[in-house]
Image: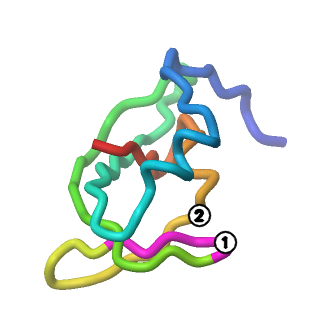
Amino acid sequence: MAGIKKALEVPEMPVGRLKQELKIGAAVTVSKYSLLKDYTYIQREKRSGTVAVLSRYIVVLDFGCYQECFRYTQFFECGGDRLRLQ
């Protein structure tokens, strides 16, 4: 059984605003968070990319020398890979 995850105080972006601002060429920050033993998150790395492709279920980000796919739901999650518009 998975442990209890503490929610972080993250300002939520309405879905309508996300759909308006998320266009090809928009800047996005990807932060990787890890869950510690005391159920708090710690930021491990941070990188920036631009939106290359918008699909029905995923968004493809271009980081210069490589591209990576992410789910739209990762804009609203608090752990793992967290996406934010710049």
| Residue closest to the eye, 11 or 80 | 11
Residue 25 percent location from the top left of the image = 28, 67
Residue drawn where x is 53% and y is 45% of the image: 18
Residue 31 percent location from the top left of the image = 34, 46
Q: Which mark is residue 71?
A: 2
Q: Is residue 59 magenta?
A: yes
Q: Which mark is residue 57?
A: 1
Please name the predominant secondary structure of the magenta segment in the image: strand
Q: For mark 1, give the secondary structure.
A: loop
Residue drawn where x is 58% and y is 72% of the image: 58
Q: Is the residue 12 above or below the residue 69 in the image?
A: above
Residue type at numbered disc 1: Tyr
Residue drawn where x is 22% and y is 72% of the image: 63
**Disc 1 and disc 2: Cα gap in Å?**
6 Å
Q: Is residue 32 magenta?
A: no
Residue type at numbered disc 2: Arg
| Residue closest to the eye, 7 or 36 | 7
Residue 45 percent location from the top left of the image = 25, 48
| Residue closest to the eye, 16 or 10 | 16
Neighbor class of circle 2 (other Cα within 10 Å; few <14, some 14-19, many 20+) is some
| Residue closest to the eye, 53 or 16 | 16
Quarter location, residue 86: top left
Colour scheme of the rendered structure: rainbow
State if disc 2 and disc 1 touch (CB < 8 Å): yes
Dot 1 or dot 2: first in sequence order is 1
Instruction: Please report the bounds of the magenta region as a residue range.
Output: 56-61
16 sits left or right of 65 in the view: right
Q: Is the residue 83 above or below the residue 13 in the image?
A: below
- Taking the view exactly as shown, the residue that stands out farthest to the left is 64
Q: For mark 2, give the secondary structure.
A: strand
